[in-house]
Image: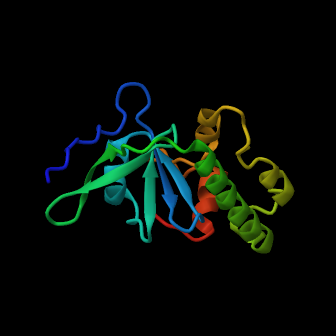
Amino acid sequence: MTLPSREPDLAPTDTDGRIVLLAGDDTFCHVYRDIAELLDEPRYYDKLGGAVEFFDPTGRRLIPVFSADWQLVELHRSMQSATPEVLRGRFKAVMAHLERFVRHRPQVLGDDRVDVEQVLAGLPDCDAPDFADVVDALPRHVRGHAGNLLHNAVHAAGWSH
């Protein structure tokens, strides 16, 4: 029996090459501008640890491709349909984890002048009608920049890179 073979498409490069990294236990998420930024990450920051999954900005799973020495080299689109509503729920779980963490450890916000309630009110709206708006609001890192408050709080809540 010969099974049909179809090479999955490469990760999106035409209009929106962003990559959403999501912890397998829904405690962390991060958006990378593109595969180059994701692959560059270990050169500038700590290496990621833990189980992670990759998605494109539409909610389609991205399949990791590894080199012979088990280094991530690229991501391919899965042949499964995008699941933005499933991801929306997972993003809500990340934000709920972050809120619990910050409420129990407000010192992670650093400056006493930062109001916890104000920060929490600024968490992304995971119910925004357009899924792209949800992805736009997720934490991301810009090389050479310390990151915004959301980015840093997500890391303080248990993940490093």
Q: Is residue 110 visible?
A: no
The image quadrant of residue 120 is bottom right
Q: How many marks?
A: 0
**59 shown above or below 157:** above
Residue 152 in picture, x, y percent from top left: 60, 58
Asked which quadrant contains residue 18, the reply is: top left
Residue at left offset 73%, top offset 42%: 127
**Between 6 and 111, which is closer to the camera in this rendering?**
6
Residue at 62% x, 36% y: name it. 131
- Give the left or right position of residue 120, taking residue 93 as reference: right
Front residue of 145 and 105? 105
Taking 51 as reference, is 92 left or right?
right
**Colour scheme of the picture:** rainbow
Q: Vertical placement of 138 versus 29: above or below?
A: above
Q: Position of residue 84 (x, y in %)?
A: 58, 43
The quarter of the picture where the N terminus appears is bottom left
Q: Is residue 114 above or below residue 4?
A: below
Residue furthest to the front: 1
- Residue in front for this viewpoint, 110 or 1: 1
x%, y% of residue 128? 72, 37
Whether residue 154 can be seen here: yes
Q: Residue at x 84, y 51 (%)?
A: 118
Q: Nearer the viewer, residue 153 or 76?
A: 76
Q: In what quadrant of the picture does the C terminus appear?
A: bottom left
Instruction: Residue 85: give x, y in percent of width and height.
Output: 63, 45
Q: Is residue 151 left or right of residue 23?
A: right
Outermost residue, top side: 15
- Residue at figure coordinates x 69%, y 55% from the top left: 92
* In the image: residue 79, left or right of residue 134: left
